[in-house]
Amino acid sequence: MKAMQEKPDKVGPDGKSLFIPAGKAKRRPEAIADLMKDFIRSQNLAPGSRLPQERELIDRFKAAKGTVRAAMKALETQGLIFTRSGPGGGAFVAAPSAQHAMELLATHFFFDPPSLSDIYAIRKALEPEVAALLAGRMTAQQLALLESTILIYDHPPTDSKERYRQRVAELDFHSQLAQLSPNPLLGFLCGLMHNLLRDLPLARQIYADPSPSSREEGLSFQYRLMAALKDGRADDARRIATEHMAFAETYMLARAKTLGP
């Protein structure tokens, strides 16, 4: 019988591996970090709970001090634990924030950022569904928050700084909807797209562009969407959001062409 050959990694254009094959051993600190996560779950440790002292962790996981410290550092980077020095200090379970998770994911695209078309392909597919889910389910306080955001850009800007703040606030409106999504994964993915767009150099250049913007058209879409959300008209909310995303993509791509490479 022929010996089973290990399946080779897939590689990208640069020859680098794109993924780790199933069954490939993790580095020791990564494996210990996974065991620590299992420990947190099994012990039902809530955010704010203190973790065992370093000596106990070393004994529990049969790992060297340096390995445990590297695992703890990895969990701290992931936002799952935090440390505090001084009396009463130590390591504690943290509540990872969505924003922190998005920032970590965004580093994947640091050297090869997505294009505007890439981002809007996702926005067009997902944001109409967020709008439909929220129709008729939003509280008066949540609707008031959206209305207060609209007030930031419901008037012509007085200078370049206000213009930029207005453009970012227009995106904040959609981020607020994403945060309210009854489907947390759907909302997270939409929020990730917004973060990628905020950090995209070309998008920032468009937001700072003094040429006439799409503020009035965007406002019209958002006012119509707000009305559908208040009235509980899910189909209308989905349709309006779909039209809005298509309009926004067209506008952004057109502005990108005028700004050049």
Image (cartoon, rainbow, N blue to C red):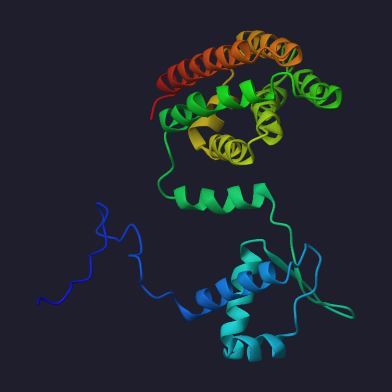
Q: Residue furthest left?
A: 1
Where is residue 125 shown, x and y percent of the image? 48, 26
Nearest the eye: 160 or 115:
115
Q: Quadrant of residue 217?
A: top right
Residue 257, placed above or below residue 104: above
Instruction: Name the residue located 18 percent from the left edge and 72 percent from the top edge.
Output: 5
Q: Is residue 213 visible?
A: no
Instruction: Name the residue located 74 percent from the left edge and 16 percent from the top edge.
Output: 158
Where is residue 91 shown, x and y percent of the image? 75, 75
Residue 210, placed above or below residue 57: above
Instruction: Name the residue located 61 percent from the left edge and 37 percent from the top edge.
Output: 191
Q: Quadrant of residue 259?
A: top left
Horizontal relation, residue 25 to residue 92: left or right: left
Q: Quadrant of the N terminus?
A: bottom left
Q: Quadrant of the C terminus?
A: top left
Nearest the eye: 52 or 164:
52
Where is residue 148 shown, x and y percent of the image? 81, 22
Q: What is the number of callouts on the image? A: 0
Residue 33, placed above or below residue 194: below
Q: Quadrant of residue 131?
A: top right
Horizontal relation, residue 122 to residue 141: left or right: left
Q: Is residue 58 visible?
A: yes
